[in-house]
Image: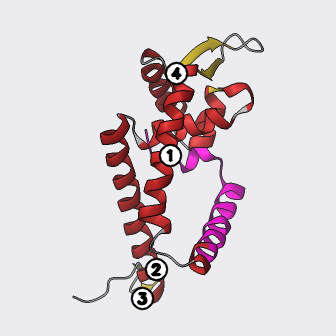
Amino acid sequence: MSEQCLCHDGADVIDPAEQRCLDSFLDSATRLYLALDRQLLVAHDVTFFDARLLQVLDAAPDGRLRVGDLAAELMLSRSRVSQQVRRMAAAGLLHRSTSPDDRRGVVVTITDTGRRRAERVLVTFGNLVRTHYLGPLSRAQVIALGHSCARVSSGLKAGQPAAVLSGVQ
């Protein structure tokens, strides 16, 4: 099978080594997300983004954030996070309330039940990350990959708001 590169008017936009790098990154990132999502659902009946939301709220001051701030942190649309919050609130993991600063805004607070669930979920999440992401790499590779990803993220953050980057609805 011949290598396929991103081309324009017959000229390679990226070379074969760059294409392999991109393909490997996209393949591993997608497989990692799918593995984490599937295994978190089986173990705790939460999705990858549910676990991330619990992680963010658990670490937030007073365990609370506005929906817009959660959406920015998770790089998801506000409507997607609002749906997620409603579902998780119905399960008793979160509490929704009107913002005291802006009556139109919604503040989300992790409940005691949510904190207990987060504790279990985040242990599993950490073990899965170690198994599927960190485990196959040497310490030097972990550090190099972290620096590389931070550099890419930094450039994207500087160029566009998170809502523009989010294709997940």
* Circle 2 residue: 21
- Left or right relative to 155: residue 53: left
Residue wearing tag 1: 123
Q: Residue at x 57, y 28 (%)?
A: 115
Q: Between tags 2 and 3, which lies in front?
A: 2
Circle on res. 144? none
Q: Earlier in the sequence, mark 4 or mark 3?
A: 3
Q: How many marks?
A: 4
Question: Reading the chain from its start, which is encountered first: label 1 or label 3?
Answer: 3
Residue 15 visible within the image: no
Q: Which residue is mark 4?
A: 113
Q: Earlier in the sequence, mark 4 or mark 2?
A: 2
Earlier in the chain: of badge 2 and badge 3, it is 3
Number of residues whose C-alpha sits closer than 10 Å to that of mark 4, classed few (under 14), some (14–19) or many (20 or more): few
Numbered label attached to residue 16: 3
At label 3, the amino acid type is Pro
| Segment tinted magenta in the rendering | 143-169
